[in-house]
Image: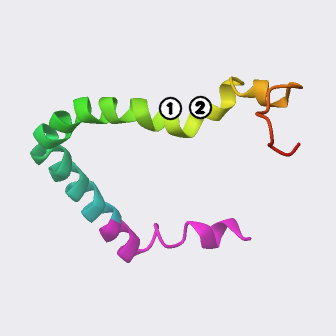
């Protein structure tokens, strides 16, 4: 892929206007909604604990006892 075509949009008038609009919108989002974001941070921390437990629990190897002989209940197929 040609490198000139990749950043051609951002060097055009439309791209510069879009970048300026995104910069102004980002500034106002940060300045006007800081209280909302900071108010949610403690809840995000609390929510991250059970989510990490659910999605990352398989990686620490606590369930390897299932492969040991004699660890299956009677009547369960091997």
- Tell me the residue at 74%/71% (across/down): 1
Q: In this view, does 29 lie to the left or right of 72?
A: left
Q: Is residue 29 shown above or below 44? A: below
Give residue 17's mark: none
Q: Give the range drawn in magenta.
A: 1-18
At numbered mark 2, what does the secondary structure look like: helix, strand or loop? helix
Residue 62 lies in the magenta-colored region = no
- Tell me the residue at 15%/51% (across/down): 28
Where is residue 15 shown, x and y percent of the image? 40, 71
At numbered mark 1, what does the secondary structure look like: helix, strand or loop? helix
Give residue 53's mark: 1
Colour scheme of the rendered structure = rainbow
Where is residue 70 shown, x and y percent of the image? 86, 25
- Tell me the residue at 77%/26% (across/down): 64
Q: Distance between the residues labelled 2 and 1?
A: 5 Å
Front-most of residues 25 and 38: 38
Where is residue 42 shown, x and y percent of the image? 24, 29
Question: Quick check: marks 2 and 1 in contact, CB under 8 Å?
Answer: yes
Question: The C terminus is located in which quarter?
Answer: top right
Question: Label 2: which residue?
Answer: 57
- In terms of image quadrants, where is residue 60? top right
Crowd class of label 2 (few under 14; some 14 to 19; many from 20; radius 10 Å): few
Where is residue 54 shown, x and y percent of the image? 51, 38
- In terms of image quadrants, where is residue 65? top right
Front-most of residues 44 and 55: 55
- In terms of image quadrants, where is residue 31? top left
Q: In this view, does 20 lie to the left or right of 52?
A: left
Q: Is residue 19 shown above or below 12? A: above
Q: Is residue 54 shown above or below 12? A: above
């Amino acid at each position: 892929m040609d490198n000139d075509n990749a950043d051609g949009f951002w060097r055009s008038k439309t791209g510069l206007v879009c970048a300026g609009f995104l910069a102004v919108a980002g500034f106002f989002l940060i300045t006007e909604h800081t209280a909302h974001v900071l108010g949610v941070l403690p809840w995000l921390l609390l929510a991250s604990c059970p989510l990490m437990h659910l999605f990352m629990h398989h990686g620490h190897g606590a369930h390897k006892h299932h492969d040991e002989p004699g660890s299956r209940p009677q009547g369960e197929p091997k």
